[in-house]
Image (cartoon, rainbow, N blue to C red):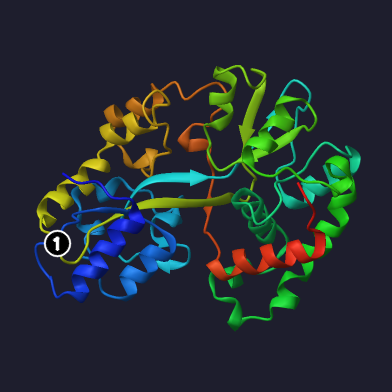
Amino acid sequence: MTHYHTADAVTRVVSEKTAGRDTGGAVDAIWINGANFISMKENGLLFGPFAEELPNWRYVDTTANPAVLTDFTVPVEGFGAPWAMFQMVFEYDSASLSEPPKSAVALTAWASANPGRFTYPQPPDFLGTSFLKQLLYGVLEDPEVLQSAIVDTDYEAVTAPLWAYLDNLHPNLWRQGQVFPENEPALGALLADDEIDIAFSFNPGRASAAIADGTLQDTVRTYVWDAGTIGNSSFLSIPYNAANKAGALVLANLILDPEIQARAQDPAILGFQTVLGMDLLGVEDRARFDALDLGIATLPPAQMGTALLEPHPDWMTRIAQDWTARYGTAP
């Protein structure tokens, strides 16, 4: 068995297509997301649809986690089987903050009353731009516009509430918004050093891991916003010319098995958030998840709330560029 990085695997399939090798391909399954998935799907390089025909698909929670059906606004349409969820969670020290703000409006009000106790990574860092996308969901009257490319919208008018929000928020940020942490580790360090009261992560188990290694106080907890937080799913796809499609289908189904998903969510093994719905499982399988020790700060699957769909990639690129033009500074 040969293992490739995703980009190398995609390149291999493209090369085989160019060479006319339409069967017996070298790649049987790929962990794939974003631009690579879009390119392969649009160019007919993926086998399927298959995911929704898998026996274990019946356990996938498509209601609470619509991201299992869409990859950065592109409908998956069964050309990829979801196998793990990643979702933004906010982190706070419950010893000093009893009721953290759970919306964009509540956050700016809290920051005004507690100046200098919040910040976010500087875009174009991934977590920083993810926070901006989270804010867009909180300040736009119709967030559905985020599911389309910017060329179809009035960008200036749509994003005006975001910039107005940030103009109001920044004077109350850590160091008055004149300096921003570089990335997620830098943001987490500020929380650990008690320089801020609220941080956030795309890994729901990050705080528990940091508590376990002594980096964070054991009073730190996580929470999500009332209307949901940005989330996305990782997918397993099968190349159109895979030599072992049957084996790849068995693998895709096995990864969705409740026992395997529960093991994957165990922080001692992988710590990945499940794509399964707890209310779709039988008593025995749900008990597997209930028995997991996710860590003192990690929310159980039933308390993760709605995973908001990732906006079209255009938004991430454009708002990061505009943020830099408006507020950019050295970290």
Q: Is residue 19 left or right of residue 321?
A: left
The image quarter containing residue 74 is bottom left
Residue pictured at 55% horizontal, 76% vertical: 149
Residue 199 position within the rendered picture, expressed as x and y whole percent measured from the top left = 69, 37
Assign a secondary structure to mark 1: loop
The image shows residue 151, relative to residue 215, as above or below, that is below
Residue pictured at 66% horizontal, 51% vertical: 128
Pointer 1: residues within 10 angstroms few (<14), some, or many (20+)? some
Residue 24 position within the rendered picture, expressed as x and y whole percent measured from the top left = 9, 62
Q: Is residue 330 left or right of residue 145?
A: right
The image quarter containing residue 92 is top right
The image shows residue 229, relative to residue 12, as above or below, that is above
Nearer to us in this view, 165 or 56:
165
Counting labels gives: 1
The image quarter containing residue 47 is bottom left
Residue 90 position within the rendered picture, expressed as x and y whole percent measured from the top left = 65, 38
Give the amino acid at mark 1.
Gly
Residue pictured at 32% horizontal, 69% vertical: 40
Residue occupied by mark 1: 25
Q: Is residue 201 left or right of residue 235?
A: right
Residue pictured at 10% horizontal, 67% vertical: 23
Nearer to us in this view, 44 or 255:
44
The image shows residue 84, relative to residue 218, as above or below, that is below
Residue 78 visible within the image: no
Residue 103 visible within the image: yes
Residue 315 position within the rendered picture, expressed as x and y whole percent measured from the top left = 61, 68
Screen quadrant of the N terminus? top left
